[in-house]
Image (cartoon, helix red, strand yellow):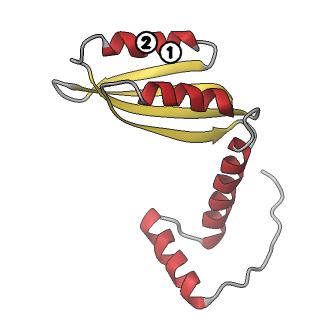
Amino acid sequence: MSQLTRTALAIDRELLEKFDGWMAGRGYTNRSEAVRDLIRSALVEAEWEDPAAEVMATLSIVYDHERHELAQQLTQLQHADHHAILCSQHVHIDDHNCLEAIIMQGTAAQLRRIADAITSTRGVRGGKLTLLSRSI
């Protein structure tokens, strides 16, 4: 574990009350851990601003598996960038819908391009790219 450094923050009362409510709603038990997580999140987002940054991500999609050739199109898109796709997990939600989680590694620009190509495919009902970092 790295060495912790104490610091003090000046925050107006109303903002601190809102922050405490936000923390409680997410299960945080102390402000320090909540602030550390927010800092990490901001640093990951900043890292993703550099298109050449080596990053990781999870792309979660929901799609209609009965849509003609959609599963095949999604597989082809993943194969086209197989070097960036680490793995995927396929889950059957109900008779018509599937959830797929795709774990990727590469440059920020590459992973955004892959995510955009997959989520914009006709029949994909929704998608969420979760940004991760290899270094933070």
Q: Quadrant of residue 12?
A: bottom right
Q: Position of residue 90 (x, y in %)?
A: 36, 21
Q: Please give the residue where the numbered disc 1 appears in the rendered image.
A: 78
**Position of 117 relative to 12 (above/below):** above
Per the image, label 1 sits on a secondary structure element best described as helix
Question: Would you say 68 lies left or right of 47 here?
Answer: left
Kind of residue at badge 2: Thr
- Marks 1 and 2, Cα distance to the nearest angstrom? 5 Å
**Residue sitting at x 32%, y 16%:** 70
Asked whether the beta carbons under mark 1 and mark 2 sit within 8 Å of each other, the answer is yes
Q: Residues within 10 Å of mark 1 (few under 14, many from 20)?
A: many
Per the image, label 2 sits on a secondary structure element best described as helix
- Label at residue 75: 2
Q: Position of residue 129 (x, y in %)?
A: 51, 38
In front here: 6 or 40?
A: 40
Q: Position of residue 111 (x, y in %)?
A: 60, 29
Kind of residue at badge 1: Gln
**Position of 100 relative to 127 (above/below):** above
